[in-house]
Amino acid sequence: ILAQAVSARKRQAHPESCGGFICASMARSSWLGWLVAPCALVQAADIFKLPALPFGYSALEPWIDTQTMTIHHSKHHAAYVAGLNAAADSLGSAAGKGDAEALANLQSKAPSFGAAARNHGGGHYNHALFWVNLQPPSESSEPSDALAAAIDDKFGSLDGLKTEFSKAAMGRFGSGWAWLGVKPDGTLAVTSTANQDNPLMEGLEYTFEKMVPILGLDVWEHAYYLKYQNRRADYVSAFWKVVNWKKVSRNYEKYALQGKAVPPTPTGGGHATEL
């Protein structure tokens, strides 16, 4: 009888299904609400989504290999999204709509919401920004005039930036990220952070350069070990072959110079697929 009631009601309402149970659209008005409420709650909590890549998993070959990209995005990044959704109740209104802007705005306060929000919220944001700042090596680009001038002023040249950035990437012991960003005084700087922290976060217990990041490099071993093994320096060098300077320039001009965290979307990157 229960199965027949569920089936009839499901045909009537056309609700979404979740693991074989009927979800929120039916729970609102049905005597079966007690049965489906847990399912509805699970759906409601999953407000953060794994973003699709604006290129295929093989697009960054030969510098970042297909297997690494597949595992890194579909497994590692997905795990951070799942962990952040599991902690969503602790975020309250800071979760917002779970979109790119809300994710960016969450970063400064993430540590104050606890370890899960810090680790998974940072992991989700860092990876989402990482992906959209990359492009296939066949689609070369250069920094905009404004960003190029700022790079020359701070580092002497693009090669000077690469040298300082590489020092940050190689100097990060264990797992973490290297970053290029804009400091509160409007100048560029390079820094690194541990684990899934980023330089937007307040209250980190170690020294780093506070900034709005416009470009980041993942130096966790899962980002490079299948291809480069223990040769992190080779991975860092290869990174520059796939940087999307058009996107990084937009991050700089539209957001970082205004003191705003960069929403990790592919907009303005000139990707073949604009999501």
Image (spheres, rainbow, N blue to C red):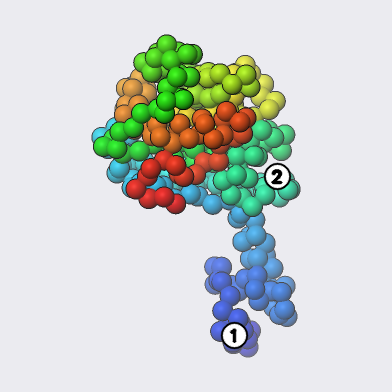
Q: Quadrant of the N terminus?
A: bottom right
| Circle on res. 12 | 1
Image point 69% across, 35% down: which residue?
109
Q: Amino acid at mark 2?
A: Ala
Percent position (x, y) of residue 214?
51, 30
Q: In the displayed structure, would residue 173 be above or below residue 80?
A: above
The answer, for residue 131, to whether it is visible in the render is: no
- Residue 163 at x, y percent in the picture: 40, 14
Label count reads 2
Q: Which mark is residue 98?
A: none
Instruction: Assess disc 2: are there few (<14), some (14-19) or many (≥20) residues with their C-alpha within 10 Å of its C-alpha.
Output: some
In the rendered image, residue 275, in percent from the top left (x then y), is placed at 44, 51
> Please, which residue is most extreme toward the front here?
145
Question: 157 and 234: which one is in front?
Answer: 157
State the residue lying farthest toward the top. 156
Q: Residue at x 67, y 47 (%)?
A: 95
Instruction: State the mark number for residue 94.
Output: 2
Image point 67% across, 21% down: which residue? 205
Work out whether mark 1 precedes mark 2 in sequence or the reverse, and give the earlier one.
1
